[in-house]
Amino acid sequence: MTARERVAKLLKIWPKVYPDAHTELNFKTPLELLIATILSAQCTDKRVNMVTPALFKKYQTAKDYANAGPGELENAIKSTGFFNSKAKSIRGAAAAIAEKFAGNVPSSMERLRELPGVGRKTANVVLGNAFGINQGIVVDTHVIRLSQRLGLTKQKDPEKIEQDLMKLVPQKYWAIWSHWLIWHGRRRCYARKPDCANCEVFRLCPSGEDFIRTGEARSA
């Protein structure tokens, strides 16, 4: 089975397995999603969602974040880790949004990438989930792991993996594809001891038999 054939079959299975797949970061506006995504770097969505309710209540506009006093924003996001660098990215991005885009988060890859601290992955999250624009595929640790295990790429670099996936997955599925892989990675295909015995796509996974044979997968 080719990688393209495997993707075609997965596209029929994922919607049945994860019909409600979506970003697990809580947000109501593009700005909130941008902030939450910056905070999610090397941090769990669960932890970010514990921090953002108070944060979003206190800071409601890009200008609010840009003008946050010294140490104020850092203290508010401290529990997400790497809070100094995250605060710097948030202030920089917010200032650019306020000054260059009239306070509105831009809705194109090119303009989002102009924002300090915003890389392609963050831009893809915002475009796909806040604007419904399929410009690319979000590649996080789960997507990297599952893409390799499913035989969809041999690359290790996130942007190269994204390019491989974009060639295999029809564009209209780019945003949801990431959610399917992320949900499966969190619920079944763990980094260590994947639950192959109960995996819904085991028959399509070229790595599954290896895990079973070496005893690394969980038994039923």
Image (cartoon, rainbow, N blue to C red):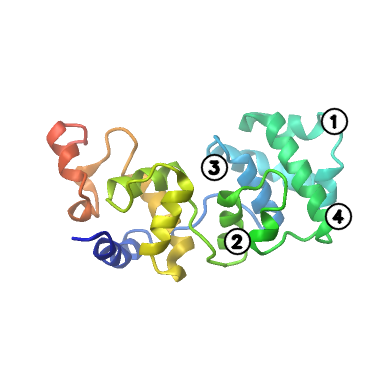
Q: Secondary structure at mark 4?
A: helix
Q: Residue at x 71, y 54 (%)?
A: 31
Find the distance from the CA under tag 3 to the CA under tag 2. Answer: 18 Å
Q: Which residue is mark 2?
A: 127
Give, as a three-letter code, the residue at label 2: Leu
Q: Is residue 202 left or right of residue 28?
A: left
Residue type, numbered disc 3: Asp
What's the CA distance linking mark 1 and mark 3? 26 Å
The residue under the point 58% across, 51% down is: 120
Name the disc covering residue 99, or none. Answer: 4
The residue indicated by pointer 3 is 45
State how far apart marks 1 and 4 are (Cα). Answer: 20 Å
Residue 60 seen: no
| Disc 4 and disc 2 in contact, CB within 8 angstroms | no
Task: Please give the name of the residue rendered at 44% of the width and 56% of the height, measured from the top-left corner.
Answer: 163
Q: Secondary structure at mark 1?
A: loop
